[in-house]
Amino acid sequence: MANDNQKVAILTDQTDQAFIEPTKQVNDQNDINKFITSEAYNRLTRFIELLNESVVNKKISEPCFVSELVQKVIDSLNILMSWIDEIPPLPTSQRFGNKAFRSWVARLEQVCHNFINSIAKKIEIALFIFVIILQNASIIHQDILPPQFHDSIIELTPYFTGGFGNATRIDYGSGHELSFVAWLCCMHLMGLFQEQDYSALVLRVFTKYLDLVRRLQNVYMLEPAGSRGVWGLDDHQFLSYYWGSAQLQDHKRLKPKSILSEELVNKYSSDYIYFGCIKYIREVKKGPFHEHSPLLYDISEVPNWTKVNSGLMKMYIAEVLKKFPIVQHFVFGSLLPFKPVIERRVADQ
């Protein structure tokens, strides 16, 4: 891994460049090989690692710096949460795929003017860019962004709108989680998020995002996208376990095997993302834990959280970033370009 100075050097202000509409580049397995040697891969994995380092031994309930920009992101997620109550699921006998989810997604493209005018007037970059209809972005962003960011909306929007599931397939998975994190990464690359924001991006923004997508999954019965069933880590998430294990790195009482105790899981689920994930699994899946979640059960046998954390990053690369069914949907622009990496580094592979 590159040292800290090298990592931060990559994630610096990129606003002097020309922004473009991101496009798909991964069409077959050969393109996966290009992706893992690309600048996009390098920047994404560095960003993910930076956030991981920022939450080592930190509880969700601990105070952390929350900037105006971070708070606006949280507020926007709360608004999206409220829409679920306003758009109830339709009567259906299907196990997965309530079509009301399409109405929820459609609203993202219908309310942009009101949101931007009333909420995002005075901030440097509009936090509701994700609700802007792509074909109207060139007009609307002139009113909400300062001159140096006017061209960025065309590039940022697809990452956010791709972060909550697919309206056509009515599904959600780790690829959508990746898209949301890519959105955060892009704003970091533009200099909008600073190092002081790292902890809040995980402990405030990402936890709020988890609350939202879990409600979407439950209310609209979103099908797991690309799930490997019992042989996968989780039907929907992955980074929640990676960052969650960092929180627990030197915990004196809680060990990886502690997830097998329902009492401990319930007690600590609000403070530790990893335990929150286990609690959610126990709520939505029936039967013995070792049967419906054998991989998580096996990970509980690892002796310490440091090994769990490093192993999960390797697994994330292997099971998400190197998987064609997931990465084929990812889009690439100027901030996360498909071109070969500028500065090579030794990745955890």
Image (cartoon, rainbow, N blue to C red):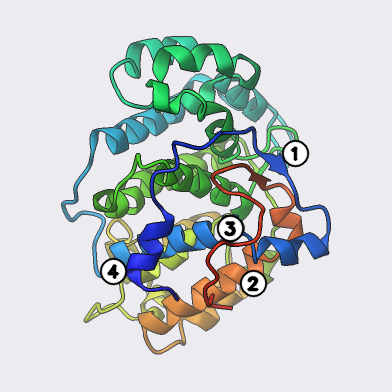
What residue did someone put label 4 on?
56
The reply to whether the C-beta atoms of the residues labelled 4 and 1 are less than 8 Å apart is no
At label 1, which amino acid type do we have? Arg
For residue 149, above or below residue 230: above
Left or right of residue 168: residue 145: left
Image quarter of residue 28: bottom right
How far apart are the two marked residues, 1 and 2, measured between alpha carbons?
25 Å
Mark 3 vs 2, N-terminal side? 3
Mark 1 vs 2, N-terminal side? 1
Left or right of residue 164: residue 339: right
At label 3, which amino acid type do we have? Glu
What residue did someone put label 2 on?
318
Name the disc covering residue 169, or none. 1
- Secondary element type, mark 2: helix
How far apart are the two marked residues, 4 and 3, measured between alpha carbons?
26 Å
In percent of width and height, residue 128 lies at 44, 25
Q: Residues within 10 Å of mark 3 (few under 14, many from 20)?
A: many
Q: Which residue lies furthest to the bottom in this view?
A: 303
- Pick whichever, 331 or 226, lies toward us: 331
